[in-house]
Amino acid sequence: MNMKKAAVLLILMLTAATFAWAGPPQEKDSQLERGHKVYDKWCFPCHGTGVGKPGTDALKARGQNPAVLEERTDLTAALINTVVRHGVGFMPVFRKTEISDAELDAIDAYLMRNNKK
Ligand code: HEC
């Protein structure tokens, strides 16, 4: 076998070994982690803790307690998805090119992680 064929074979073997090494994905945890990441990028600037967070301030002014979304236990996917895709008040619409349906599902899972089952 020539060098080139040997090199290709080696790369194939390494690739296969890498996939075997990764093992089965932790479905649920990775979904929550993904949701947390997407949330931090797009939602935290308005819905986080601390001062100058317009989403948290607006919900606080409305009497929502807790006002921080990450602390809620009553959010539903239906509410989150409607608000994210259609906007509400000062909150903008997020398009699928910004937040995909799969990413929105992950946000739902993340924000509903503490809901009573
Ligand atoms: C530019 C600031 C801003 C961003 C970014 C933002 N929001 Fe909001 N959000 C608001 C404001 C302001 C309200 C309150 C609107 C009102 O009721 O007048 C709100 C309300 C909501 C509500 C309704 C809560 C309730 O109890 O009615 C949900 C759910 C929500 N946002 C989810 C999200 C998610 C998820 C993201 C990220 C994808 C996000 N928001 C990004 C500003 C923002």
Image (spheres, rainbow, N blue to C red):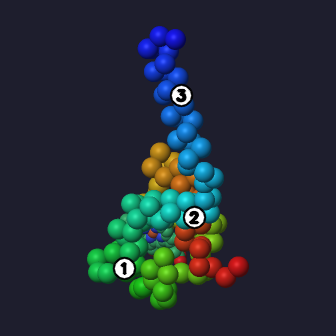
55, above or below 97, in the image: below
* Residue sitting at x 49%, y 19%: 6
Give the image location of residue 66, x and y in percent: 48, 86
Q: Count every numbered label the image shows and give the total.
A: 3
Residue 12: mark in rendering: 3
* Residue sitting at x 56%, y 47%: 21
Q: Earlier in the sequence, mark 2 or mark 3?
A: 3
15, above or below 62, in the image: above
Residue type, mark 3 in image: Leu
Say which of 86 and 38 sits in front. Answer: 38
Q: Residues within 10 Å of mark 2 (few under 14, many from 20)?
A: few
Q: Secondary structure at mark 1?
A: loop
Circles 2 and 3: CB atoms closer than 8 Å: no
From the image, state whether disc 2 or disc 1 is nearer to you.
2
Q: Give the residue pinned by disc 1.
A: 49
Say which of 55 and 7 sits in front. Answer: 7
* Residue sitting at x 52%, y 11%: 1
Distance of mark 2 from mark 1, alpha carbons? Answer: 24 Å
67, above or below 14, in the image: below
Q: Earlier in the sequence, mark 1 or mark 3?
A: 3
